[in-house]
Image (cartoon, coloured by chain):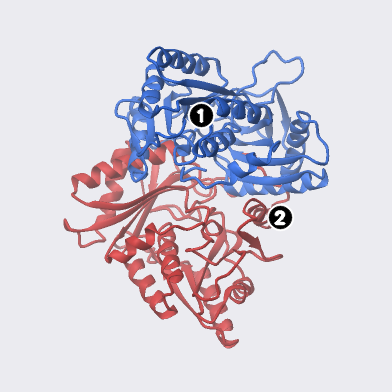
Chain colours: A red, B blue
């Protein structure tokens, strides 16, 4: 499919310039880097940074704002940002309270972020990190051992961002982040593979009428293909798989996120959200917070993911509900 | 392409139930109708209603909120809402200050909205309307005479919504709306035709690598097909066509909206927005307000539209900048 780009090599840089133009009142791009940061950095609080390969828009620049991230770092499409860019971002936002890196659990992302953390510490900066691994698509006995970081990362941005604004220390934020991550699970399905920008080739092949369970956000194919029956059937499958992750009883409270992977219409997202609502009511599970939209995409993949976060402390819900001016929340 | 739906006949109703679930703190659906309305209606101000066929999400329910619409009315996909639903919406929100209908200029939409207005007036309610016709895709000598209402409608929602909240009268709002509509122009292009929900057939045929200028939001094909060269070339074409509509000189101030038609990635939207910025700078045109995103889609059509609104009075910009809690603004 034709796509609205110029020279492919300029794609990410031009995207970031577009972001800086459209959101010029609040965001700036640091020239020649993948960094989008808040125009005014609060030096009295811990600064949060997240990032990763491009192709997941509005992640992560859409979450830069008061009460969420101080800066995001974008790499090339599906390739993590360079260590030097991450280090530059740390220096841009670091105050006396330090910097927390929110890293999605992909090997190359973790390597580059931790390398940048090490270099920043050498320069005397206070830096720590959490690694988000909300993807629970690994089937028993699968060779795919790694729980990846996917849409649940946005809940981590929001909760830690609100807590950081309230003055929580770096150490406390790391602890809070790890607790939230443990309570977060996501499962995604594709209805059609995405194509890389400017390419006609699907990243993986999916037969007509089939869906793939457990896909990743970089075009990774899932662990099982099945015919598509209905939104309700799909919601039921995903809910059952997600609930296995929890010690599920009638006192559970959940935050729920329905995430479109890029090419899925808003209509479909709401139909699916409606099915999730009805099925969780039948399970007597209380949904105390809910969102639906394109939060972490995989370029133009048709599909959806469902994220559950069990609210284990009242404060988590309060942090989710706090206002932010990050444009994609 | 497989889509995440249940029975096709239930699609719109389930979408609206999903909207009411996800946005339950602020919005409610009126059962068995296409109406989404604010949970609490301000009876001290003129209430605004807009609506149309489904398939343009987040239009129009995404613009229901404080400082924008009081209610939206959705019809079946690409079919305007029934007169009885529009009348019911008027009754739901009407206070002593009256109701203004914001209608997109499609024949069937205008017919049903004006019929509902007539019936409401018979019942003693104070109702008036504006008709948005921002689509300037009609080529000289074309048989397509009607300027349709497309993405520029969202600017009308925003400006009138902020003015209504400030206490502007129905008569003044109509006058303001008409002035804003006269200053608003939109031009859209498709890179691929959309498909109706659940259908494998494209609504119109577009050869690979071709783009269609002047497409509508109901799958209407455009007036001219051309090869796609680059985002910059496309931006230049659209800007030139839009500027013809204005008495263009160096004192113009514009609000600009880049609108994705559904299947166009956020990356492409920002790349295009960046080209628009650079080209308008070269023309010495001052952009004083800018937005980019999926504001009025055409189900899953790949494409983009560009809207210009010439800011003729300072107050218009102030109204655009006022806060609103409508979730899609």
Q: Give the image location of residue B262, x and y in percent.
A: 54, 37
Image position of A25 (left or right of A70): right
**To which chain does the residue with label 1 belong?**
B
Residue B16, quarter of picture: top left
Asked whether B224 or B178 is in front, the reply is: B178
Q: Give the image location of residue B146, x and y in percent.
A: 64, 17
Q: What is the number of the mark on residue A10?
A: 2
Q: Residue at x 69, y 25 (%)?
A: B137
Label 1 CA crowd tier, 10 Å (few <14, some 14–19, many 20+): some
Q: Is residue B2 above or below residue A49?
A: above
Q: Is residue A182 above or below residue B311?
A: below
Residue A90, quarter of picture: bottom right
**To which chain does the residue with label 2 belong?**
A
CB contact under 8 Å: marks 1 and 2: no
Q: Residue at x 66, y 43 (%)?
A: A4
Image position of B25 (left or right of B305): left
Q: Is residue B115 above or below residue B7?
A: above
Label 2 CA crowd tier, 10 Å (few <14, some 14–19, many 20+): few
Q: Secondary structure at mark 2?
A: helix
Residue on which the image places disc 1: B195
Q: Residue at x 47, y 63 (%)?
A: A67
- Which residue reaches farthest left? A250
Quarter of the image with the N terminus of chain A is: top right
Q: Give the image location of residue B283, x and y in percent.
A: 82, 43
Asked whether A139 or B112 is in front, the reply is: B112
Q: Is residue A145 above or below residue B117?
A: below
Q: Residue at x 42, y 63 (%)?
A: A148
Image position of A127 (left or right of B189): left
Asked whether B320 or A66 is in front, the reply is: B320
Q: Secondary structure at mark 1?
A: loop
């Amino acid at each position: 499919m034709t796509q609205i780009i110029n020279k492919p090599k300029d794609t990410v840089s031009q995207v970031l310039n577009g972001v800086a133009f459209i959101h010029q009142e609040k965001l700036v791009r640091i020239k020649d880097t993948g960094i989008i940061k808040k125009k005014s950095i609060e030096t009295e609080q811990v600064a949060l940074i997240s990032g990763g390969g491009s192709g997941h828009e509005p992640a992560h620049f859409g979450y830069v704002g008061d009460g969420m991230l101080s800066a995001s770092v974008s790499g090339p499409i599906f390739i993590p940002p360079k260590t030097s860019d991450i280090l530059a971002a740390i220096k841009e936002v670091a105050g006396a309270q330090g910097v927390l890196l929110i890293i999605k659990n992909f090997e190359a992302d973790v390597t580059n972020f931790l390398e940048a953390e090490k270099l920043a510490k050498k320069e005397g900066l206070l830096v720590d990190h959490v690694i988000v691994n909300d993807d629970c698509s690994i089937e028993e006995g699968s060779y795919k051992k790694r729980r990846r970081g996917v849409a649940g990362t946005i809940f981590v941005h929001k909760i830690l961002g609100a807590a950081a604004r309230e003055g929580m220390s770096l150490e406390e934020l790391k602890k809070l982040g790890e607790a939230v991550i443990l309570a977060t699970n996501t499962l995604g399905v594709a209805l059609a593979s995405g194509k890389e920008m400017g390419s006609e080739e699907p990243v993986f092949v999916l037969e007509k009428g089939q869906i793939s369970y457990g896909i990743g956000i970089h075009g990774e194919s899932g662990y099982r293909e099945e015919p598509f029956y209905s939104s309700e059937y799909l919601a039921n499958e995903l809910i059952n798989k997600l609930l296995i992750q929890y010690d599920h009883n009638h006192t559970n409270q959940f935050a729920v996120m329905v995430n479109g992977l890029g090419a899925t219409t808003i209509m479909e997202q709401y139909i699916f959200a409606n099915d999730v609502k009805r099925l969780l009511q039948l399970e007597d599970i209380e949904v105390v917070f809910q969102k639906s939209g394109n939060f972490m995409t995989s370029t133009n993949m048709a599909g959806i993911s469902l994220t559950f976060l069990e609210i284990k402390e009242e404060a988590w819900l309060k942090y989710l509900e706090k206002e932010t001016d990050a444009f994609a929340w």
